Amino acid sequence: MPLYNDMFELSVDDIDLIENSLRRAQTALSHADRDESEQERREREEALTRIHDLLGRLHDQKIFYRPKSGVYVGG
């Protein structure tokens, strides 16, 4: 059985593109179709949950920097 590559070489721009794509997919999936079946609704909600969880994991891996001296002004 083949093993998965766990060493990725992604740039910050690559991650940004992935995040933006996930957010667009999330937006598209969040609009329910009135004619969708119960099975389709469950699949759509499952996909939304997976996207939400992945976006959370990407966010948790970011390192946010603050200046070492001076006053930090967040925004």
Image (cartoon, rainbow, N blue to C red):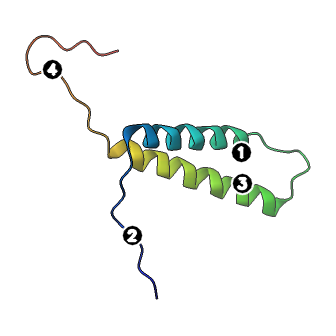
Q: Which numbered marker is on residue 44? A: 3
Residue at image point 35% right, 15% down: 75
Q: In the image, what residue type sits under mark 1?
A: Leu
4 or 3: mark nearer the eye:
4
Residue that badge 2 annotates: 5
Amino acid at pointer 2: Asn
Q: Which residue is mark 1?
A: 29
Q: Please, what secondary structure does the residue beneath circle 3 have?
A: helix
Q: Residue at x 38, y 39 (%)?
A: 12
Name the mark on residue 55.
none
Q: Residue at x 51, y 39 (%)?
A: 17
Which is nearer the eye, 54 or 36? 54
Crowdedness near tag 3: few (<14), some (14–19) or many (≥20) residues, C-alpha within 10 Å:
some
Left or right relative to 13: residue 22: right
Residue type at mark 4 is Pro
Q: Do the residues under discs 2 and 4 have CB atoms within 8 angstroms?
A: no
Q: CA distance from mark 3 to mark 2?
A: 29 Å
Q: Nearer the viewer, mark 4 or mark 1?
A: 4
Position of residue 50 in the picture relative to residue 3 (left or right): right
Residues at circles 1 and 3 in contact by the CB criterion of under 8 Å: yes
**Distance from label 1 to label 3 (Cα)?**
6 Å
Proximity of marks 4 and 3: CB atoms separated by less than 8 Å = no
Mark 3 or 2: in front is 2
**Residue 2, image x and y in percent?**
45, 83
Label 1 neighbour load within 10 Å: few <14, some 14-19, many 20+: some
Q: Residue at x 10, y 11 (%)?
A: 70
Looking at the image, tell me whether mark 1 or mark 3 is earlier in sequence order. 1
Comparing labels 1 and 2, the label whose residue is closer to the camera: 2
- Label 2: few (<14), some or many (≥20) within 10 Å? few
Q: Is residue 59 above or below residue 45?
A: above
Q: What residue is pinned by disc 4?
A: 67
